[in-house]
Image: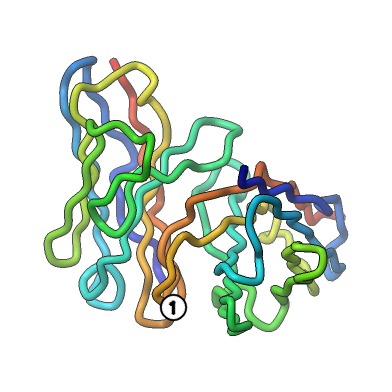
Amino acid sequence: QSALTQPASVSGSPGQSITISCTGTSSDVGPYNYVSWYQQYPGKAPKLMIYEVNNRPSGVPERFSGSKSGNTASLTISGLQADDEADYYCSSYTASSTLVFGGGTKLTVL
Amino acid sequence: EVQLVESGGNLVQPGGSLRLSCAASGFSVSRNYMNWVRQAPGKGLEWVSIIYSGDETYYADSVKGRFTISRDNSKNTLYLQMNSLRAEDTAVYYCARDGGVRGVIDYFDYWGQGTLVTVSS
C-alpha cells in the first residue's frame, strides 16, 4: 500500500488561508469517508484535527476544516496563526482493511 | 482522563525480539479498537497494526508475520511483540486509541507519548 500523496511543504502568512491536499486512489480515499488529519509538533505525538473527512473533535478551532472530492481529500486552515506551524498528516482506511498515512506536509507560517 | 503510556523500547540487534507495552487508563482497551503507529527518525507516520474489540487483528505488509498485537484485559494493557527485527523497524512506536465504532480503522483520538526502538548492531 503506497502512502497517500501530500505536498512536502506549504506556507502562508498570518491571517491567510492554506489548503493541504491528500491524494489517494479508488482503494482508499475514494470509496471511504474515513479520512483523518493529524497535527504534529517536533518531538510530540500527533493530535487529531479532523476525522471522517470533515468532523472536528471537541477543542479543535473552527479555523480547521476538511473536505473530499473523488480520490483527493483536503485540509483547509483559515486565519493562519503562528502556532499552526507544524507537520500535518492525512490518513485513510483502505480496501485491504488497513490504514495508510500521507507522507506529511510541513506548514510554515511566514 | 484518558491516558496511554508506552514502554519497552530499547536498542536491539538485527534479528532480535522486543515486546512493547501500552498501559491504558480512563477507558477499557477491551472495548475499544487499539492501534500501533510508528515513525522512523525524520520520517512520516506509518500504521502498524490494529486489534479490534472482537480480537480480530490486521497488520501492515511491512510487519506481517513478524509482529503480533495483543492485549491483557485484566491489566488494561496493549502489547506489540516484535520478532525478526530489521534496521528499517527503527522508529518511535506509538499506541493509539481508535475513536470509531464501525468495524474499520477510523481515527486516532488518543495517542501515547511513544517509545523508541532502535535496531542496530
Letter of the chain that mark 1 sits on in the rendering: B
Picture quadrant of residue A100: bottom left
Residue in the image at 74% along x and 71% along y = B71
User: Disc 1 designates what residue?
Assistant: B103
Q: Residue at x 73, y 47 (%)?
A: B5
Residue A26 screen position, x and y as percent: 22, 76
Q: Does B3 sit above or below residue B62?
A: above
Q: Which residue lies furthest to the left in this view?
A: A69
Above or below residue A14? Residue A75 is: below
Q: Tell me if residue B67 can be seen.
A: no
Which quadrant is the N terminus of chain A positioned in? bottom left
Amino acid at the residue labelled 1: Gly
Picture residue at 25% right of the left edge, 36% below the top: A64
Image-quadrant location for residue A94 = bottom left
Where residue B49 sits in the image (x, y, percent)?
59, 70
Which picture quadrant has residue B35?
bottom right
